[in-house]
Image (spheres, rainbow, N blue to C red):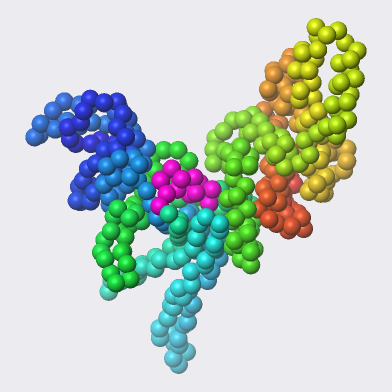
Amino acid sequence: MDLNGTFEERERCDVILGITSNGKSVTLKECHLISSKGEIIRGYKISTFVISVIFIGAHFSKPEDIRFKSLSINYSYLEEWIGKRLFESQTIHEEGKFKEHHLKYIRPEPIKIETEYLSIQLIYRFGYSVSSYKIPEINSKAFVRIESKAELPFEEWFSIIYHIRNFLSLAMTSTGEVVYPLIIEGESERVIEMMTDAGPIFAPVKIIPCFGELIVLPKDREIQYWDILFGFNAISRQSEIYFQNWFSKSELLKPIYDLFFSTLYDPQMYITNQFLNLVQAIESYHRRTMRNNDLPQEEYNKRVSEILDKIPREYANWFKEKMEYRNEPTLRKRLKEIIDAFEIQEFFDDEKDIKMFVNKVVITRNYLVHYDKGLEDKALPPERLFPYVQRLRTILLACLLKEIGFELGEIKSMVRKYFERYVHHLTLHK
């Protein structure tokens, strides 16, 4: 971003305050100087910065002042996910001839979702423009409005925006599309537009992330409600529980979220990295949510003690260090237990097919991590990884749906929807 003005010769500024060309206050956060050109009119220089976030409509003097009481976000495909019918139409004929056409907009009531820390609403904004000579333009956008009991720093809001984006992207997995925030607006107690008898009205602050996970990308294509893995209607009766689960488990499952969604948000990621990310996510999921002992810990400790009694004392510490993590299940066992737990066997030809799949995944993971020459000929080359990546994503999809709160029957139905669209025609290379 190029800025006109006089700046201290500093490589980094926490905030820069300014005015846009149309007179709006603007705050630039985390500004890194790239270059500063020679003097121009009025003695100003043109300085080029890399900016983290732009806030239009407010001046925040310090990073700690950038706090909001609520945020409203329009995500791509949010309208399709909610699935509300917004328009009714009627064509009127007289004497068999067209006379007029009526289009009626039905504004849905806000959908309220209460969680332990946040109040979430799904709301619609409606606008239109009419010209006597042109077709009127109608604009209806859905927003996720999130209110906090107390003002939160933007870093915490950033995390909330990201988690909701992940939730919606998971719901969209069967469409082949991912979700991006298209519009982000915040309300801050530092930006009051007017005072009324009912209380203050806050001026909206437009928020534009400039890099990272929330960069705005255009919608790729139109999708239909029935293409979505699960729409709002599927969770509407217990939406609070589903969102609460997603947020409350975010700390426990953060590595799994990050690894899984990285393979969706970065379609250009090398296939080997996608493979490793998904395998690591499955391992981490099993370790954090399922039995993480190969033997009962008491029995394992007993075996280690008995061996320690029989080896020279000078080797005791070395042996104990080597055995510290030996009671964890192998990747082979973790994969098999997850496949059994979610009854994913039906997505393979038979038990032999499952055994071959697991074996190839284990060998290839070990080779890609350690590059052991002895495994090179047995591991899958990159051009043969795609069917395995899709099956691993199917397995992890089942895991995440379970953590949201879906029952096993619902999970199998949704996984089947994804599998039949993206996986069933892919042949595993034996």
Q: Residue 32: where, in percent of width, then height?
A: 32, 30
Q: Residue 123: where, in percent of width, then height?
A: 46, 65
Magenta part of the chain: 151-164
Q: Is residue 285 visible?
A: yes
Q: Residue at x 72, y 27 (%)?
A: 365
> Residue 55 versus residue 394: which sits nearer the camera?
55
Q: Is residue 357 visible?
A: no
Quadrant into which the N terminus falls: top left
Q: Quadrant of residue 130?
A: bottom left
Of all residues shown, which one is farthest toward the left?
42
Of all residues shown, which one is farthest toward the bottom?
95
Q: Residue 298: where, in percent of width, then height?
A: 85, 31
> Residue 211 versus residue 391: which sits nearer the camera?
211
Report whether 381 appears left or right of 293: left
Please give the count of numbered marks on the rendered protein.
0
Q: Main secondary structure of the magenta part?
A: helix
> Residue 366 versus residue 53: which sits nearer the camera?
53
Residue 155 inside the magenta-drawn segment: yes
Residue 52 inside the magenta-drawn segment: no
Q: Residue at x 20, y 31 (%)?
A: 7
Report whether 246 appears left or right of 310: left
Q: Residue at x 86, y 7 (%)?
A: 312
> Residue 62 versus residue 96: which sits nearer the camera?
62
Q: Residue at x 40, y 55 (%)?
A: 69
Quadrant into which the C terminus falls: top right
Q: Residue 189: where, in percent of width, then height?
A: 33, 55
